[in-house]
Image (spheres, rainbow, N blue to C red):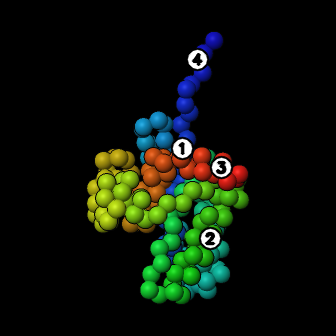
Amino acid sequence: MAPVPIRTPVRILGIDPGLRRTGWGVVESDGNRLIFVGCGSVEPPDDLPLASRLLVIHDGLAAVLREFAPREAAVEQTFVNKDGVATLKLGQARGVAMLVPASFGISVSEYAPNQVKKTVVGAGHADKNQIAVMLKILLPKAEPKSPDAADALAIAITHAHHRQSANLRLKVVGI
């Protein structure tokens, strides 16, 4: 009789929502070990109307979910900036980024930008270069082609480190 594994690896999709580029990154978490699976970005043409851009993001993320079959997903929370209209539009992209995994039956966790930076770099106000350096250490095979894909990988890593508490919160709320 074969021994039952104590833990099973879990595939995690990280999403960095945006209207111009929605970054995505997939990692596999096996205990403390992280394995790079894939990353990229969905980039709707700039000349499309808002509804069509959101549809491109939806279809692109759905294709990623079909190809990589993650079991859990994480999205970066929206930060409020001085431009209210831009914040609202980003919120719409973020809504699509949360809707797509949910429509596949996958739980979606949310993380603040500072929590992502603190988890990956160790400082909540780290810059994109510091995140890129840490990604090379944590996921040596990853070569994100855009900062959005790199951020999405950082979000997936954050979820890998905090998923037990995130899953407990979802159970407490009854989701």
Which residue corresponds to mark 3? 172
The earlier-in-sequence mark between 4 and 1 is 4
Q: What residue type is labelled 3?
A: Val
Please state the horizontal and vertical placement of residue 81, each as a whole percent of the image: 45, 81
Of 6 and 39, nearer the camera is 6
Count all numbered tags in the image, as a single digit. 4
Label 2: state its secondary structure: helix
Label 1: state its secondary structure: helix
The earlier-in-sequence mark between 4 and 2 is 4
Q: Does residue 132 sit above or below 31 in this rendering? A: below
Which residue corresponds to mark 1? 164
The earlier-in-sequence mark between 2 and 3 is 2
Which residue corresponds to mark 4? 3
Label 3: state its secondary structure: helix
Q: Which amino acid does label 2 sit on?
A: Gly
Mark 3: few/some/many CA within 10 Å (<14, 14-19, 20+): few
Q: Which amino acid does label 4 sit on?
A: Pro
The earlier-in-sequence mark between 4 and 3 is 4
Mark 4: few/some/many CA within 10 Å (<14, 14-19, 20+): few
Mark 4 vs mark 3, CA separation in Å? 32 Å
Mark number displayed over residue 95:
2
